[in-house]
Amino acid sequence: MSLFSKFDALAERRQALSDTGAKPFDVVVEKIISPTEAIVNGQEMIMAGTNNYLGLTFDPSCVAAAQDAVSNEGTGTTGSRMANGTFASHIALEQDIAEFFGRQSAIIFSTGYLANLGILSALTDRDDVIIIDSDCHASIYDGCIMGGAEVIRFRHNDPEDLAKRLRRLGERAANALIVIEGIYSMLGDRAPMSEIAAVKREYGGYLLVDEAHSLGVLGERGLVEIANEHDSVDFITGTFSKSLGATGGFCVSDLPELDLIRISSRPYVFTASMCPSVIASTRAALAQLRKRPELRDDLWRNANRLYEHLQSLGYELGPHPSPVIAAMVSDIEEALALWTGLLKRGVYVNLVFPPATPKTCYLLRCSVSAAHSTAQIDRICDAFSDSRNEFLSSSVA
Amino acid sequence: MGAACTACRRLIVDTGRALSDTENFGAQRMDTFDERLAVLCGLLQPHATQGVVVGPETMLASDLGIDSAQLLEVLLEVEDEFDVSIPLNVLPSVQTVNELMNELDKLIEAAG
């Protein structure tokens, strides 16, 4: 029995996967050509699994801002804000984000994962209760565990189930923290925001919405904005690594106590802060997001086109069109064959395995970008179609 | 629920384990615990690996033919049946059906 014995089953599964010839864990992106193209394993590829929703990773203003910041402020902060000090640019980004969301204050974190970890673990302790949607991201689960609060799940996107669980809490419901997401990362479905806000108003408690996949995708600011539920939501978290093409995370709130997180959150205090170039490109991307609403139009046109095509092929998808489009497959052999077939045809999508997936199926998860051309979307559609046909004919044979 | 209870109770008695696990409780509690355990076993039985009769010592991870994510889905049904919410925090220390029942029992008693 060694230290690594616990990984035996995992290693066995990985080996079995590798033996099939499909190597989803060995993908190397050798050269990035554009927001939607790269060289992968020596082959030119349309990238359809990047979460680069607005396609801003090569935006000239973002690249120039990052270059200037590197020249003027150096490559990194070399430590935490608590120890090494806060850069003026950290404060500038926090002011930008707070103003953008129309909130009193903002705190930025080094990644989106750390934003959820830092906020949830600091806000709650063993005397508190957190109620989370069952499909919430791992960062939310991990933040809950780190804080030590009592953690309860409610059925995905089911406001009645949430209400039932708040009712069971009795008086404790008034202080419970409810956590949902704007767009869920695996199937691309969105939370029933107004219904959940109504439940929160009835039972009390606090509401946190993670807009990681919905910032700049649903309206400018996400689901809370388009559902007109600003006043029902106490905290919004999110990431700079998707629609803003950088890395980092944030939390905004109107509650003045938010500032206390800075001295109580371990994932904030004990990690290196965002580096100047990333801050600069994030601020530039935020400006682009606000200045160019046509990016969202392009994004949704592409999303609708791909969703409709995959639906017409008979794939089971999320409940409605979204920039996250996941084809659900129940059989691992089919999932591997399709993923390999797509790769062979120059299309890279995410292959996701249970238990990371809802409904315990396998996912061929696409994320669409505003930067995809119509021709690229059609090539993705064709690759899905051809890969499926190839699989079906090999199954018959 | 009555029919399911009777069926499950029979399954448990057949394993010869349930009574010995619960006989240390007082009579009234034993009845209550026993009935709840039977209901729980009945809910878990459809998910058991072929040939496994769900009883108090059934291991949730290895004897049910489901992974951890599927187990969480099954627990949603269990929560509905007993009208309680099982905190995720207690699950790492729960390995057997009996241990799950003990946690459920605490929640049911706390809810009054």
Image (cartoon, coloured by chain):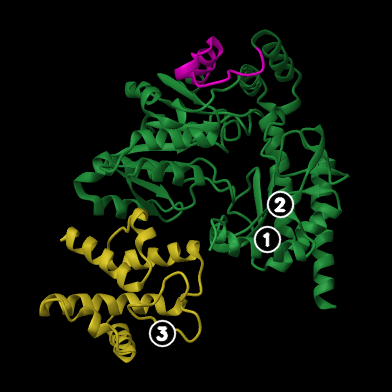
Chain colours: A green, B yellow
Q: Are marks 2 and 3 in contact (CB under 8 Å)?
A: no
In the image, the segment drawn in magenta is A74-97
| Left or right, A159 with reference to A290 | left
Residue A137 in sight from this viewpoint: no
User: Where is residue A393 shown, x and y percent of the image?
Assistant: 84, 72
Q: Amino acid at mark 1?
A: Arg
Q: CA distance from mark 2 to mark 3?
A: 38 Å
Query: Badges 3 and 1: C-beta atoms under 8 Å apart?
Result: no
Q: Is residue A225 left or right of residue B107?
A: right
Where residue A333 sits in the image (x, y, percent)? 72, 68
Is residue A96 in the magenta section? yes
Q: Residues within 10 Å of mark 2 (few under 14, many from 20)?
A: few
Residue furthest to the top: A72
Q: Which mark is residue A384?
A: none
Q: Secondary structure at mark 3?
A: loop
Q: Which mark is residue A14?
A: 1
- Which residue lies under the disc numbered 2? A25
Q: Chain of mark 3?
A: B
Which residue occupies 42% across, 67% down? B74
Q: Is residue A110 magenta?
A: no
The part of the image, by quadrant, that contains residue A173 is top left
The answer to whether B107 is drawn above or below residue A140 in the figure is below
- Discs 1 and 2 lie in a common subunit: yes
Q: Which label sits on residue B53?
A: 3
Residue A159 position (above or below residue A279): below
| CA gap, disc 3 and disc 1 | 32 Å
Amino acid residing under circle 3? Val
Question: What is the CA distance from the residue labelled 1 to the residue labelled 2?
Answer: 9 Å
Query: What's the amino acid at mark 2?
Result: Phe
User: Which secondary structure, mark 1?
Assistant: helix
